[in-house]
Image (cartoon, rainbow, N blue to C red):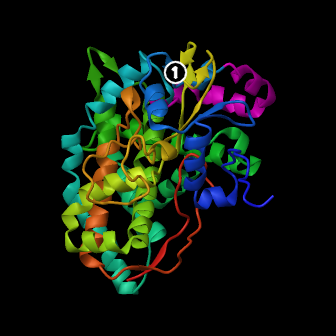
Amino acid sequence: MSGVAEPLVFNPFDPSFRSDPYPFYNRLREEDPGHVSPLGFHVLSRYDDCAAILKHPNVSSDQRNAADYELWRASNPEAVAFTERMEPRRPFLFMDPPDHTRLRGLVSKSFTPKRVEELRPRVQQLVDELIDDAIGRGSLEVVEELAYPLPVVVICELLGVPVADHETFKGWSRLLARSLDPDIVIPPDVQRQRVEAITSFHEYFLDLIARLRRRPGPDLLSALVAAEDAGDTLSEDELLGICTLLLIAGHETTVNLIGNGVLALLRHPDEWARLTADPALARTAVEEVLRFDPPVQFDGRVAMADIDLGHVQLKKGEQPLLMLGAANRDPRQFDEPEHFDIGWSDNHHLAFGYGMHFCLGAPLARLEGQVTLATLARRLPDMQLLNDHPPYKENVVLRGLAELPVSI
């Protein structure tokens, strides 16, 4: 019957959802904020619910604590075998205290906001070089020719990776980014490629770590190799887990931040004009991009006890999906959340998470986003979209464009 809304079914693989999930998010928040997916888990879409779980003392970031983990093990023997083989190299993003506290503390000593800010001149140089190349060509494909090469060079230089290996690094990043998606949604051939990428990545860094132990440099990885706190140092497996996390969190998410940001600005010509008139607005513009179209759309936790959110009751062992993209447009938290405003300063989005797992790489992502958007506004003010509906990558957790051609 005409006028009847489609039933609410969370399907992140629907092409229409991938191109624009926000109408679905709006319905979900208002009509079914405690939605239960066909697979049986709760989908939380309101800001207060997501924030409450992210900071709750009785939740875990380790999916092995989920009630259905043993069922998954029984039905996925190959994935389980690989996961268990990689277990000692698990990134601390998926750990709980005290392991998370210890590893994050050691890494944070070498990844301070002050140290990141010292990278600003180098980031500016890289962005200018990439834009020089685009001007020379007379064209720019934002994703492949700007958003990808910038963070991969930055993270490679941070980790002491030679220039000759940067392109290989970029390929690993694309495959490792899929490791954030549930195995059930990844085709078998992509799973195999991901395993090969992780194996090659680890072999490469085992060799690099050995060389840096003999001859340390000024890079972040040398500092991590030497990191010590009350006699505690990082093992090789722990270093590999940290390198994996830095590659995914320090590269792929920044690619999406830049791509999503340029698209949002060019779809809102008045806001693009504001930025070209005052590139200093790039600081708040980056925060608004993170709220309006965040690179990380979903997060998850495991309830370690029964949790009552009022309209939703989670049982011990449940693994709710936290829809950060939906929470960031919740009208209960944000005035006019569908309005894109690059000058908004009171912007407490959840794009970098909340609580003890707040993104350690947030200062670097912000820096790279700010420099890129400000420089584009200053040097390419006449930029326009060549495709009003650019395609998106197939990732589920990370939302980002496959390509974004613009005229310059």
Query: Is residue 111 shown in magenta?
Result: no
Q: Name the residue type under label 1.
A: Ser
Query: Is residue 88 shown in magenta?
Result: yes
Residue 360 x/y as whole percent: 35, 37
Quarter where residue 131 is shown? bottom left
Q: Is residue 77 visible?
A: yes
In the picture, measured across the screen, residue 56 lies left or right of residue 35, that is left
Residue 212 x/y as whole percent: 34, 39
Indicate whether 125 appears above or below 354. Answer: below
Residue 279 x/y as whole percent: 22, 67
Q: Is residue 199 visible?
A: no
- Write the residue at 69% across / 50% down: 190
State the residue in front, 185 or 228: 185
Characterize the magenta stretch by its predominant secondary structure. helix
State the residue in front, 137 or 13: 13
In the picture, measured across the screen, residue 16 lies left or right of residue 123, that is right
Indicate whether 15 appears above or below 41. Answer: below
Task: Please state the extent of the stretch shown in magenta in the rendering.
Answer: 67-93
Q: Which residue is mark 1?
A: 60
Quadrant of the snapshot with the N terminus: bottom right
State the residue in front, 371 or 328: 328
- Write the residue at 61% across / 18% down: 65
Quadrant of the snapshot with the C terminus: bottom left
